[in-house]
Amino acid sequence: RRRRRRRRRRRRGNSRRAALGMFAASAPMAHATPMAHSTHVTARGARATTHAVAGGARPRRIAPSRSSSSSSTARALRARETRPPSAMTVRGAVGAWRRPRATIAARGVRAARRGTVRRAEEDRLGRAIGWSFLKTHAKACAFVSGRESRRMREVSARASGGDAPAAGTSRWSRVLQSLATTVDPTVAEALLDEELPPHEEIRRGTLENGLKYVILPNKVPEGRFEAHLEMHVGSVDERETEQGLAHLVEHVTFLGSRKRDQWLGSGTRGNAYTDFHHTVFHIHAPTTNKDGHYMPPNVLDILYDVAFNPALLDTRVAKEKKAVLAEAQMMNTIEYRVDCQLLEHLHWDNLLGTRFPIGKLDQVEAWPAQAVRDFHARWYFPANATLYVVGDFGADVDEVEKMIETSFENAAPAEGAEEAESPLSRHAVRPPVKHAYGSPAHEAGEIQRINDEAKAQGMDDPFMPFVAPEGKVSMFQHEHLSNASFNIFSKLPIKPLKRMGDLHRTVLQRIVLLVLQSRIQSRYTETNADYKRVELDHSDSAREGCCVSTVTVTCEPREWEFALQVAVEEARRLQEFGLTSSELDRFKAAMLRDSEQLAQQAGCVPSLENLDFVMEHDACGHTVMDQVAGHEALVRMSECITLDACNGACDELLGFIGEYGVSDDKRRETSGRTTAIVACVPATMPTVEGETVPFDITPARIEAVLAADYGEITPPEDIFVPEVLISDEDIVALVEETQPTFTEATMHEPTGVYQRTLSNGIRVNYKVLDAEPGSAFLRLVIPGGRSRESSEVGPGGIGAAAVGLRTIQEAGDVGEWARKKVEL
Ligand SMILES: [Zn+2]
């Protein structure tokens, strides 16, 4: 059903900003596991991409949205461990957490991986699955075992105090207060203050000319490596009359390398893209080509040539201008326009809202070739670049370091560096951007004070942050939209993730968002079948230089008031009463489980993902950890993930939705505020009778719905969620009673799929794979469907299959457990 909904959503395609700020951030996660489980469809459309594969295909835009991982949880988790707020898209996690319940199967996979008598394990796995389906009424989750969760608890219980000295005593005071009842404050403080362990295998360095580099050995995919050169210049650095120039320069330089021909036929792929804050040239190459030629030195030479020694010919500029104009034509879709709307209103306070990488086309047409050369001279110098080399490069890190030096040492230090006010006054890896923040009162006061002080001293810092007034609704109404989507934003400063306490904060935030999302969605499900969906996100954006909290409600137009009301009510309920203890248990256990799974997959992450991950993290100032260290950190702090601590995070995280329109004096001290609301709505809507009428909605009405008083808030009902749907004992009894046997068993050689038939006729097919250790996927297929319907109208007739399926889904009880419990 989830998949069906996703498809539906994609088709309707409204809210694209689910994971705000996080294209780049979520993308690495996206590839973590191969299953398509698209949680975000974040188009992040404003990013312009040159797609010029070796061999000179015409540049064209690739949709920047990449499908996300199956294990959104896994992704979410890795996100939390090493790159917390980012990619905090919670939705997948809600759905995915129960996946590890297929524990027997998972154990089989793990055992197979360890190389223990594989065949025997496979046999046992097959039987385990078979037994579960023996009785056709047996629950689909029959082989869930409590053992796994017990084991997780044991791991969690290992959490220890940490031995680092408590340095900053006040840093964690707020959270320490909330922990005081359960954890020894000295122990907790020492733990929270501990620095996160940086990834041990990452080598960082700087050449004499200022070029920074990052090297990370990574064996997946084998025999291939990635080399990306990030120039710290993007559309935000353009002057008023240069809008689109960063992108055009990217095109001309990329295609202007004299050495690009070298990779023809070698299995090497190159590409480039321009965003607000950077321009990246990337090459993916085999370590050794078909002729046995060792590739890394060549690839580095090419990157050097592209960035620091391109031929910026007049003819080339003229040609690429045409390519850029064509690209602009192609990307002008409704999704792109919605994205632009969101960015424009979210960043009303700075250039991000208007300076889209594609630029202004009339300007692009008018520039002389010299403009390209000037811009290049101004920004393309080694101290403004970071080179990333990640992969299986068949040499040790020292050798790679030497290769980098050989290829790049001749890049001349900037001629125009001073003129460009760079890099001294710039953030190390991204241009400074001025933001208006929706910080809670206690932090907003501080921002205000610094501003006043600067003003009093006559200091004028154009990048001084300031405090935003409560956001108003901006509305984008368009006939090509079919669903209404409401994006409620709160911008906050990025808090670098450097200590255990930072990680702790992001874990609490994630749990709170998971809970709220699950509560809202569950109320949506309880009502009618009209499409309603909520997505919550709280993530750092390297590209936008801020952290953004987002609530996105997407629904059919006639449901909009109700959908918004539910979101507001549930946010208020959570602020008022906090989480229930069973919610905490569930989501915490889920996070631990996913984190463990992710740690198991540590060696299987492709180079490209790791590279993107490091790039994004560096731009946010976060510590990059490896997945295993991330998991250990989480386990160690699990004792500090308490109900009080989670509840302490509620106001800060949810105030911007729960207290919209509340005056400053009545607002809670720690509640953040809304900085922008963007409603993207259709021009017309169908009535229940099927007529098409104008969609009557105004910003004022939306504001009223968000700020309305919905009466007294009642505490949430604490739903008991069974850990297992059928106990181990019941399974044993079931097996005893039915004495299952397989009537036949074969292995299909070409595919490696085992095919068995149970004594009751059910066919069981399975295959053991090495990918995604620690997890397994099951699908139960029941033949039938529309083909079994008769052509009559009535029971068993036309539509019966759909009605029957829907009934089973919507009823959804399993044994003694109601649907709601099962779904949770
Ligand atoms: Zn382009």
Image (spheres, rainbow, N blue to C red):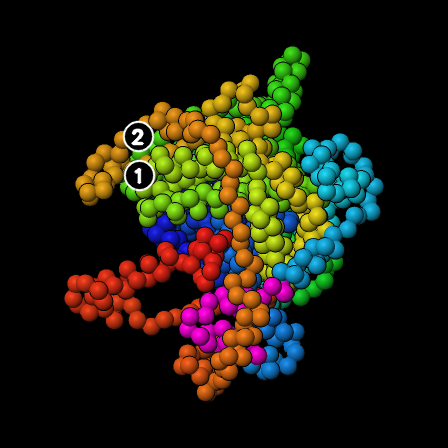
Give the percent coordinates (x, y) of residue 738: 48, 80
Q: Label 1 crowding class (10 Å Cα cut-off): few <14, some 14-19, many 20+? A: many
Whether residue 36 is visible to the viewer of this picture, yes or no, is yes
Q: Nearer the viewer, residue 2 or 255?
A: 2
In percent of the image, x 42 and y 44: which residue is there? 523
Vertical comparison of 167 with 752: above or below: above
Residue 127, image x, y percentages? 53, 79
The image quadrant that residue 786 belongs to is bottom left
Measuring from the top left, give residue 474's x and y in whole percent: 39, 28
Q: Is residue 414 visible?
A: no
Magenta stretch in the rendered image: 124-148
Report how many numbered discs are placed on residues in the image.
Answer: 2
* Residue 130 lies in the magenta stretch: yes
| Tag 1 residue | 557
Q: Residue drawn at (49%, 73%), measured in percent from left and top?
A: 132
Amino acid bearing label 2: Ile
> Between 516 and 808, which is closer to the camera in this rendering?
808
- x, y percentage for residue 224? 59, 64
* Amino acid at pointer 1: Pro
Disc ID at residue 697: 2
Asked if marks 2 and 1 touch (Cβ < 8 Å), the reply is yes
Q: In the rendered view, would you say 309 is above or below 403? A: above
* Magenta region includes residue 81: no
Crowdedness of circle 2 by 10 Å Cα count: few (<14), some, many (20+)? some
What element does badge 2 sit on? loop
N-terminal of the two: label 2 or label 1?
A: 1
Q: Residue at x 36, y 24 (%)?
A: 700
